[in-house]
Image (cartoon, rainbow, N blue to C red):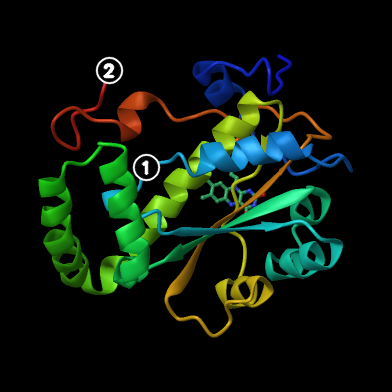
């Protein structure tokens, strides 16, 4: 099914037609499409609306080359016009001016009443402190949700993607300029571009194997 920015696929079709594409055309993503894709990416929800993802669009030939090397030479990073590097800032909640911006925006939009903001001013630092070493995991959850938005929005616009775990974190951090940044975790790489191949759906396990009702073992639909 063909799709574009003006006639995007519906959500169900985008989900069902998405495949992990490993070969991309040497064709840039038009700037209006890329802009929209970024907007839809950051429309993702995040814990307390912290928006603690840090997303780097790797586009230049040199950066793609070093990023591909950090990803064990996986060609999709070299071929795709853009690879989204989803990083996660585990300490975003400690940045007072950023938090103030989040609160003020929600207040102006009347999305959060003042009493909610007052509550969050107390609750967010407490919640995050209690997470201890899990702050990284929580930030990565937010980044992964944003990446899912990117992949599905891209599909809806006629682009393809490949979720990627195959890379060395220290090397990816070096490429994006975060080598000495202990609070930045890499969540995912996502090359985006026009597919130069079609791939078949490798299929999924029967629902009853990994979906349950009420308790593990009680397979859904079994
Ligand atoms: C978190 C995650 C990491 C993945 N890492 C890689 C990767 O490094 N390289 C790759 O070629 N495919 C990678 N894949 C793609 C999977 O192999 C693919 O999603 C799976 O086989 C199902 O195929 P489909 O995406 O076409 O439905 C990854 C997928 C996910 C969700």
Q: How many marks?
A: 2
| Ligand 1 image-quadrant field | top right
- Locate the N terminus and report the quarter of the image it occupies: top right
User: Is disc 2 placed on a helix, strand or loop?
Assistant: loop
- Given residues 39 and 186, the one toward you in this image is 39
Residue 130 pos. (x, y %): 15, 69
- Locate the C terminus and report the quarter of the image it occupies: top left
Q: Classify residue 70 by image quadrant.
A: bottom right
Figure check: 105 above or below 202: below
Q: Classify residue 200 by image quadrant.
A: top right
Residue 62 pos. (x, y %): 84, 68
Mark 1 / mark 2, whichever is N-terminal: 1
User: Does the beta carbon at disc 1 come under 8 Å from ligand 1?
Assistant: no
Q: Is residue 153 visible?
A: yes
- Given residues 119 and 210, the one toward you in this image is 119
Label drawn at residue 199: none
Is residue 210 shown left or right of residue 44? left
Is residue 151 shown left or right of residue 73? left
Figure check: 170 above or below 114: below
Q: Is residue 47 visible?
A: no
- The residue lying at 61 percent from left, 17 percent from top is 9
Identify the residue under disc 1.
45
- The residue lying at 33 percent from left, 32 percent from top is 209
Is residue 193 shown left or right of residue 109? right
- The residue lying at 43 percent from left, 45 percent from top is 145
* Most distant residue in the right direction: 26
How far, Cα to Cα, is label 1 from label 2? 30 Å
């Amino acid at each position: 099914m063909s799709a574009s920015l003006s006639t995007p696929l519906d959500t169900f079709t985008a989900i069902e037609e998405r495949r992990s594409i490993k070969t991309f055309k040497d064709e840039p993503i038009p700037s209006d499409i890329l802009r929209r894709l970024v907007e839809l990416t950051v429309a993702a929800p995040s814990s307390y609306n912290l928006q603690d993802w840090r997303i780097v669009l790797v586009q230049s030939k040199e950066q793609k080359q070093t990023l591909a090397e950090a990803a064990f030479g996986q060609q999709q990073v070299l071929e795709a016009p853009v690879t989204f590097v989803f990083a996660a800032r585990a300490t975003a909640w400690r940045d007072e001016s950023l938090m103030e911006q989040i609160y003020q925006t929600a207040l102006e939009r009347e999305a959060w009443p003042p009493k909610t903001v007052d509550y969050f001013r107390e609750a967010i630092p407490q919640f995050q402190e209690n997470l201890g070493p899990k702050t990284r995991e929580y930030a990565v959850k937010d980044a992964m949700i944003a990446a899912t938005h990117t992949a599905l929005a891209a599909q809806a616009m006629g682009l393809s993607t490949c979720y990627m775990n195959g890379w060395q974190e220290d090397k990816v951090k070096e490429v994006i300029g975060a080598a000495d940044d202990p609070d930045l975790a890499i969540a995912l790489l996502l090359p985006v571009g026009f597919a130069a191949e079609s791939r078949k759906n490798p299929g999924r396990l029967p629902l009853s194997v990994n979906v349950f009702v009420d308790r593990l073992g009680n397979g859904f639909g079994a």
